[in-house]
Amino acid sequence: MCGRYVSTRGPRDLTGLFGATLWDPQETLAPSWNVAPTDDVWSVVEAPDRDTGEIVRRLRPLRWGLVPSWAKSVTVGAKMINARAETVAEKPAYRRAFVKRRCLLPADGFYEWVAMPATEQTKAYKQPYFIAPASGDVMAMAGLYEYWRDPTVAADDDPAAWVASCTIITTEATDAAGRVHPRMPLAIAPGDWDSWLDPAHQDPAELRDLLTAPAAGHLDTRTVSTAVNNVRDNGPHLLDSPDEL
């Protein structure tokens, strides 16, 4: 799974990296070294422009934890932070978004944990690992997004009436990540970004073909500070090696 990740690139970098032509400067997110479920996260989406109807690529925030349109409460999103690549096209919570509302979720890398047994000197604890592209390039994690209408808000045109949320698609872990955890976020290769984001591309079989695990040798894994275990802690110090503390 992917339950925490790092996203420090700003909108000016991300719009250039992903060729996004639309971004609202009033939509801002602080760099985060400890992105957690229910946080707002940067996403890249393609959708019709409200005024012209033209399909545009946009950088926008989404709430991490997909809330299906039929959900009774926004709280269900906390349980839907990940969707398995093997079943995403069939699961009721994801299958409509898989066909119509796909996104890319930029990340510097992600965290996974290994349970460490107690010793005579230490208590049992969870050791976090930071897993990231060896090249230092951005990870374009495959995602889906959905809109949920809050029934407690009367007017449709009230911004508070709508929650835009997302989930990260995961796959079997490969490369160094597989030595830490059996699952990992599925990154879309740059050559497939256009096909993945295109809302007119709605053939489930063709879309599933884009969900291929990356080749070996692309990821680095290293232990980092256990400070990341506290979801309220944030900052570049979370990526420090335990030997540096």
Image: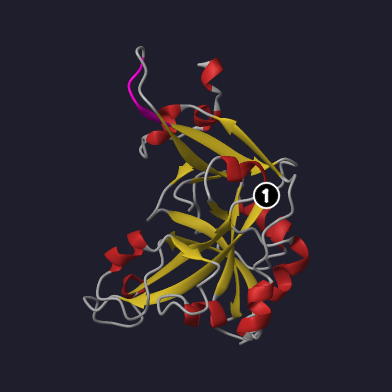
- Left or right, 180 with respect to 37, comes to right
On screen, 180 above or below 162?
above
On screen, 241 above or below 73?
above
Q: Position of residue 141 (x, y in %)?
A: 60, 58
Prevailing secondary structure of the magenta residues: loop
User: Which residue is rendered at x = 25% and y = 71% of the image?
Assistant: 73
User: Which residue is rendered at x = 28% and y = 75% of the image?
Assistant: 150
Residue extending farthest to the left is 152
Q: Position of residue 3 (x, y in %)?
A: 44, 50
- Left or right, 185 with respect to 125, comes to right
Q: Which residues are magenta?
A: 122-126
On screen, 50 above or below 32?
below
| In-front residue for pair 167/211 | 211
> What secondary structure is marked by label 1?
loop
User: Which residue is rendered at x = 55% and y = 16% of the image?
Assistant: 243
Q: Disc 1 designates what residue?
A: 138
The crowding category of the residue bearing disc 1, from other C-alpha atoms within 10 Å (few below 14, some 14 to 19, many at least 20), is some
Q: Position of residue 2 (x, y in %)?
A: 49, 52
Quarter-wise, where is residue 59 in the image?
Answer: bottom right
Q: Position of residue 30 (x, y in %)?
A: 49, 45
Residue 240, can we see it? yes
Residue extending farthest to the right is 191
- Answer whether residue 35 is magenta in the image: no
Quarter-wise, where is residue 14 in the image?
Answer: bottom right
Which residue type carries mark 1? Answer: Val
Residue 233, can we see it? no
Q: How many marks?
A: 1
| In-front residue for pair 123/80 | 123
